[in-house]
């Protein structure tokens, strides 16, 4: 059995000089994954959460500094098979944005 996890934090400072406006946004992302090994087969399941801060092109439109961050939660399930030169994998996911 294997367990994997990660976390990431981002800070973005945005300035609209012509409007004399400054804004700071924070985003947090993380994931967890479990794997179960059966000889040549591996089954896995993962759960992740991510936030995305609007990019330059999105912020530069109209009232862009007030855009909210995008949030995504995703569940992954899958299986892999490795034997000599034969590799096979199957995966699926469901995501809520």
Image: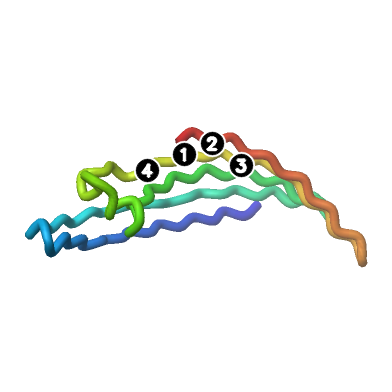
Mark 2 against mark 4, which lies toward the viewer?
A: 4
Q: Is residue 1 above or below residue 18?
A: above
Q: Nearer the viewer, residue 84 or 1?
A: 84
How crowded is the residue under tag 3: few (<14 C-alpha within 10 Å), some, or many (20+)? some
How crowded is the residue under tag 1: few (<14 C-alpha within 10 Å), some, or many (20+)? some
Please tell me whether mark 1 sits on a helix, a strand or a loop.
strand
Circle 2 residue: 95
How crowded is the residue under tag 2: few (<14 C-alpha within 10 Å), some, or many (20+)? few
Q: Residue 70 got which mark?
A: 4
Residue 48, position in %: x, y? Answer: 49, 45
Question: Does residue 73 appear to the left or right of 64 in the view shown?
Answer: right
Task: Residue at 52%, 42% (x, y): give it.
Answer: 47
Mark 4 against mark 3, which lies toward the viewer?
A: 4
Residues tagged 2 and 1 counted as in contact (Cβ below 8 A): yes
User: Mark 4 or mark 2, which is nearer the start of the sequence?
Assistant: 4
Question: Does residue 21 appear to the left or right of 45 in the view shown?
Answer: left
Residue 82, position in %: x, y? Answer: 85, 59
From mark 2 to mark 1, how far is it between C-alphas? 6 Å
Please tell me whether mark 4 sits on a helix, a strand or a loop.
strand
User: Mark 1 or mark 2, which is nearer the start of the sequence?
Assistant: 1
Q: Residue 76 got which mark?
A: 3
């Amino acid at each position: 059995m294997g367990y994997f996890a990660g976390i990431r934090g981002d800070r973005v400072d945005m300035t609209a000089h012509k409007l004399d406006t400054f804004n700071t946004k924070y985003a947090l992302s993380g994931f967890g994954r479990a794997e179960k090994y059966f000889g040549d087969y591996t089954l896995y399941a993962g759960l992740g959460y991510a936030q995305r801060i609007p990019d330059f092109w999105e912020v530069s439109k109209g009232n862009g500094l007030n855009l909210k961050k995008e949030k995504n939660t995703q569940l992954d399930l899958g299986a892999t098979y490795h034997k000599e030169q034969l590799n096979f994998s199957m995966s699926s996911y469901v995501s809520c944005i």
